[in-house]
Amino acid sequence: MIISSSKPFDEVLASLEGIDNIFVVGCNVCAARLHVGGEPEVLAMCEKLKEAGKHVVGWVLPTAACSIQSYAMLVDKNPDIQKADAILVMACGSGTSVVSRLADIPVYPSNNTDSLGGRSEEQVLPQLCEMCGECNVQQFGGICPKASCPKGLLNGPCGGSTSRKCEVNSEKDCAWELIYKQLEKTDRLELLEKVFEPRKYSR
């Protein structure tokens, strides 16, 4: 799941300065689950734009904004998109980029893309993966230190945690405390003895 959050409406409105006819595209997958781009949020955005003096020509809610196959698909869902001067996408950066490639008019995001995460037991879990292309999360009990540790440490904790909380963010559990607990639970603490070389970014 791509974790995204809504931009302040004033920021969205400022980006649309001078544009009157706006079409809104939501996302019925990640953004909908996070309540930043599902149908209720799309309808609320349309109302806010209207109250701000904008003309909303229409909206659509594709299954996933990042998987729209063609501009024709958007036209099939709502032909009024052809009346728009700009498209506002309520999805992650990937969804906004896909729509931008398909449309011949300017496309603007209403969301910020924060991280790659997930959802478990109705809890949103941000910062689960850094998408580094060198996945070895099995060595850390399924917890990625590159994504979970603010310092990205691959070889144990920094020693700066207090009461098992991260020294960078005191509200965040130390990633290495979680890694230790997970490896202990699965009887694989010997994995902590492995030393990892720094990632080579020249590839």
Image: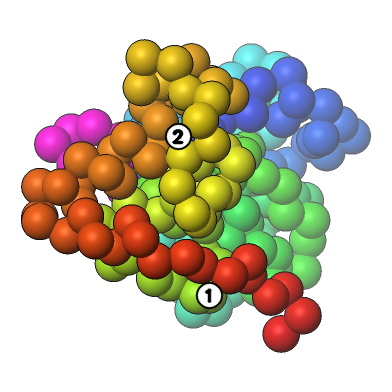
Q: Is residue 123 magenta?
A: yes
Mark 2 nearby-residue class (10 Å; few <14, some 14–19, many ≥20): many
Residue 105, image x, y percentages: 78, 61
Say what secondary structure mark 2 lies in. Answer: loop
Count of numbered badges drawn on the protein: 2
Label of residue 46 in the image: none
Taking the view exactly as shown, the residue that stands out farthest to the right is 18
Residue 108, image x, y percentages: 72, 47
* Residue at which label 2 appears: 36
Residue 148, image x, y percentages: 45, 43
Please indicate whether residue 187 sits to the left or right of residue 86 in the image.
left
Mark sitting earlier along the chain (1/2): 2
Residue 85, image x, y percentages: 77, 51
Residue at the image position 43 percent from the left and 72 percent from the top: 135
Q: Amino acid at mark 2?
A: Val
User: Does 143 sit above or below residue 198?
Assistant: above
Q: Could one spot residue 37 in this view of the protein?
A: no
Taking the view exactly as shown, the residue that stands out farthest to the left is 186
What segment is highlighted magenta in the picture? 118-126
Q: Quadrant of the C terminus?
A: bottom right
Mostly what secondary structure, the magenta segment?
Answer: strand
